[in-house]
Image: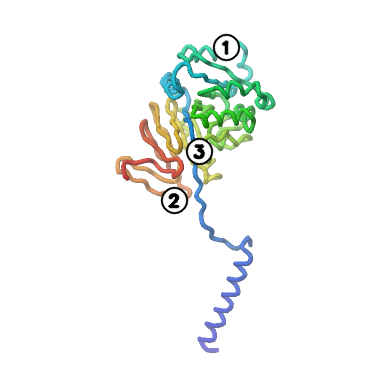
Amino acid sequence: MNDLHMIKKYSFLLLIFLGIVACNPTDKNIVSVEKTVEIESIGPENGTLLIIGGAAKDMFYTKFMELIGGPDAPIVVIPTAISSDTLSEEFLNNYKQSYIDRGFTNVTVLHTRSAVEANSVEFISAIKQAKGVWFSGGRQWRHADSYLNTKAHQAFLNVLKRGGVIAGSSAGATIQGSFLARGDTKKNTIMMGDHQEGLGFISNVAIDQHLLARNRQFDLFEILDEHPELLGIGLDENTGIIVKGDTCTVFGESFVAIYDGTRWSAERDTIYKLPVGSREFYFLKEGNKYDLKNRKVITSKK
């Protein structure tokens, strides 16, 4: 058999094999190459988010008051993340008073453990009038248990649609993401627990808090390894982000960690793409801005 005949024979066999591959793309022994779909993280079209990493000082309440338009704007404060053992009538009265002591004059405290109540017209009436909503710290799964996919949840979204403000610290920060980090009912060290869905004021994001204060800066990788489509945001205490549209701006005393598959060098004003599986992240400080949709720090470069 001459060389030309051999080439023709094996070329024909190769074409048959490729035809089989094309007809059987789900065969477990065949690796198909598909175009990577870009997943975007999208902030609210209207309104503002104030997302704080815990231990919020008075400057965050001052900023909240500024964002809602002043001390007389109606606000709803939600302590639901706090344990029921603590949420006595006396506690709720004191919780309301703490906002009045900070200068707010039109404060409604809303709390329920019942999704049925969260679906009632009576419960959401105050949210429908609110210029701002503040979610408490505690355990974020309690917020989810009471409000996720209820009429109250839709009313929160409508606050943003009207140009209002949603704020929260610690658990009140994490609940604002789409993936609920530390949402386990047993303990808060489980990153992917029995509650994994947040209220989703930002899409395709997992938010952690108390980051450096509790040495948590590597914990988000437990989520991102399983859900690489997510953007990870880690907030240290007394530090937050102000989100308007798809832009967030760091506000506060410490740092925000960004887990987006890149490394940003502020000194070089350069963004470096990281290999898949990298355990790197970078920090932003007060005044730095980040583009959620395109998942990159907003640098001085045009």
x and y, in percent, of residue 221 in the image:
50, 41
Give me the disc on residue 148: none
What residue is rendered at 60% in x and 36% in y?
197
Give me the disc on residue 93: 1
Closer to us: 128 or 41: 128
The image quadrant where one finds the N terminus is bottom right
For residue 35, above or below residue 271: below
Q: How crowded is mark 1: few (under 14 residues within 10 Å), some or many (20 or more)?
A: few
Residue lying furthest right in this view? 116
Give the Cα separation between the discs numbered 2 and 1: 52 Å
Q: Give the structural element (helix, strand or loop) at label 2.
A: loop
Q: Earlier in the sequence, mark 1 or mark 3?
A: 1
Kind of residue at disc 2: Pro
Closer to us: 58 or 29: 58
Q: Name the residue under label 2.
A: 275
Q: How crowded is mark 3: few (under 14 residues within 10 Å), some or many (20 or more)?
A: many
Q: Give the structural element (helix, strand or loop) at label 1.
A: helix
The image quadrant where one finds the C terminus is top left
Give me the disc on residue 220: 3
Mark 2 and 3 residues: CB-CB less than 8 Å, in contact? no
Which of discs 2 and 1 lies nearer the camera? The answer is: 1
What residue is rendered at 50% in x and 15% in y?
99
Q: Earlier in the sequence, mark 2 or mark 3?
A: 3
Give the Cα separation between the discs numbered 1 and 3: 36 Å
User: Would residue 16 be visible to someone looking at this image?
Assistant: yes
x and y, in percent, of residue 148 in the image:
62, 32
Kind of residue at disc 3: Leu
For residue 287, above or below residue 7: above
Q: Give the structural element (helix, strand or loop) at label 3.
A: loop
